[in-house]
Amino acid sequence: MKALPLRPGLRVLEIGCGPGVAAREVSRRIGDGRIVAIDRSAKAIALAVAGSASELETGHLEFRTVAIEDFARDPGEGRFDLAFAMRVGALDGRHPKAGQRVMTRLKAALKPDGLLFIDSASPIRGDEIDV
């Protein structure tokens, strides 16, 4: 979390948010920015929503039930400045077949100069994502 270059106003995508702990912290650190936190598990999203009432009230945090390989921005939704994932199988090499589809989705979701952080690896710029 400390390694992420968070600042007010950023648009952030969290991949594999689980119960929402990191999403809540990011929401506090980006001020008037916006974080969209996704997870393929409806149960995880329900836990995240249940534990995030005050952050959700601000309108700067949103949870969505979707796998990253199926993620698409909503119509009219801007691209993200930053995306991050910790221990997400489609990104950390555990599910290599899903990896190519995921990177295509992330390239479309990030601004060209946006940054993708996967676990503790060096960040990748949006325009450097190889698809």
Image: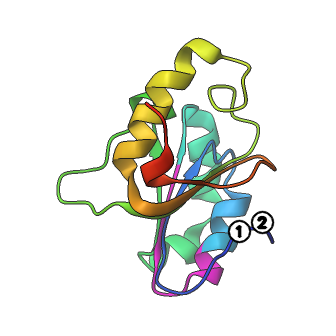
Q: In which quarter of the image is the N terminus?
A: bottom right
Residue 30 location (% of width, % of height): 57, 81
Lateral position of residue 119 relative to residue 18, left or right: right
Picture residue at 81% right of the left edge, 50% below the top:
120
Residue 131 location (% of width, % of height): 43, 30
Lateral position of residue 97 relative to residue 66, left or right: right
Dot label at residue 4: 1
Task: Tell which residue pokes out farthest to the top in this image.
Answer: 97
Task: Tell which residue pokes out farthest to the left in this image.
Answer: 76
| Viewer-closest of 41 and 32 | 32
Residue 69 location (% of width, % of height): 46, 28
Which amino acid type is marked by label 2?
Answer: Met
Lateral position of residue 13 relative to residue 43, left or right: left
Q: Is residue 103 visible in the rendered structure shown here?
A: yes
Secondary structure at badge 2 equals: loop
Few, some or many C-alpha atoms within 10 Å of disc 2 (few <14, some 14-19, many ≥20)? few
Which amino acid type is marked by label 1?
Answer: Leu
| Viewer-closest of 131 and 66 | 131
Instruction: Note whether 59 is above or below 118 in the view shown.
Output: below
Instruction: Note whether 12 is above or below 15 in the view shown.
Output: below
Proximity of marks 1 and 2: CB atoms separated by less than 8 Å: yes
Dot label at residue 34: none
Picture residue at 72% right of the left edge, 31% below the top:
92
Residue 48 location (% of width, % of height): 62, 53
Few, some or many C-alpha atoms within 10 Å of disc 1 (few <14, some 14-19, many ≥20)? some
Q: Is residue 67 visible in the rendered structure shown here?
A: no
Q: Mark 2 points at which residue?
A: 1
Lateral position of residue 119 relative to residue 110, left or right: right
* Residue 96 within the segment the image draws in magenta: no
Give the magenta-colored segment's residue range: 27-37
Instruction: Note whether 44 is above or below 55 in the view shown.
Output: above
CA–CA distance between discs 1 and 2? 6 Å
